[in-house]
Amino acid sequence: MSDYPLPNVSADLSGRVALVTGASSGLGARFAEVLASQGAAVILAARRLDRLEALADKIRAAGGKALAVRMDATDAASLIAAVDAGEAKFGTVDILVNNAGMPDAQRAHKMSLELVDQVLGVNLRGPWILATEVARRLIAAGKPGRIVNISSVAHFRYDGGGAALYAVTKTAIARMTEALSVEWAQYNINVNAIAPGMFVSEMTDGMFARMGGDPAPHLPRKRVPVPAQMDSTLLYLVAPSSECVTGATIRIDDGQSARTRL
């Protein structure tokens, strides 16, 4: 026991290399800044390269390390190329935040096959490919790692509203987290998930419009949380002191699950 500090808590990510998908806005951009602020070199991956470059400049201006990489979450070659680019710049990726995702915003029976394939590709196939690619390289290098998948409270509860396939993919992400945590435990690769509720982001801006405006008055705490209120959970799951935590899905919904239908 004397080998551990009291308390055994640390958010020091010095020497770590993190890949964050969907980093051009919202939760992903915040996740990237938080990881960089604690010493990790961060690979920013998304489709909108101009936004990624602006964020990379901001991180570097604050003394951090960042690389912007254009990535299409539906293109396997693009996903692997993003890992290649990050590895070439900073070394083996040992933190992956699978954040990229999209809502379907249509009733299940009205969705085109093209939209079905796109939602499945971005929300499930892409995270699976990235997780396995990062794990494969960590295993080959004999290094431990942390993978954080972004699920949703829609995994636990779906009240309708036209996001059924989104809810299905987010349940799949939670199950993927559990299964891969078992598969890679022997290699010291921890796989966990965060299941956010409604947070202020670019995605929810459109959702608020469809709902008829600000939903805060209908929520138990009369507010919609902001991405910064997820910082501590992200850091906990990637920091050294959570080394025994794997296979968990942590719900962060500010009590929203207690609400009645909006």
Image: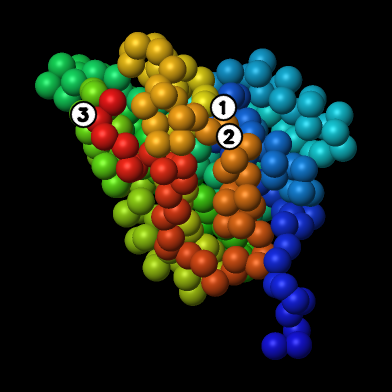
Image quadrant where residue 11 sits: bottom right
Q: Which residue is mark 1?
A: 26
Q: Give the SS element for disc 2.
A: helix
**Image quarter of the C terminus:** top left
Residue 176, position as x, y percentages in the image = 35, 53
Residue 254, position as x, y percentages in the image = 46, 42
Residue 115, position as x, y percentages in the image = 27, 20
**Image quarter of the N terminus:** bottom right
Q: Earlier in the sequence, mark 2 or mark 3?
A: 3
How many numbered marks appear? 3
Q: Give the SS element for disc 1.
A: helix
Q: Earlier in the sequence, mark 3 or mark 1?
A: 1
Q: Is residue 137 visible?
A: no
The one nearer the camera, 108 or 119, is 108
CA neighbours of label 1 inside 10 A, class few (<14), some (14 to 19), many (20+): some
What residue type is disc 1 on?
A: Gly
Residue 160: image tag:
3
Which residue is painted at 76% across and 76% down in the image?
5
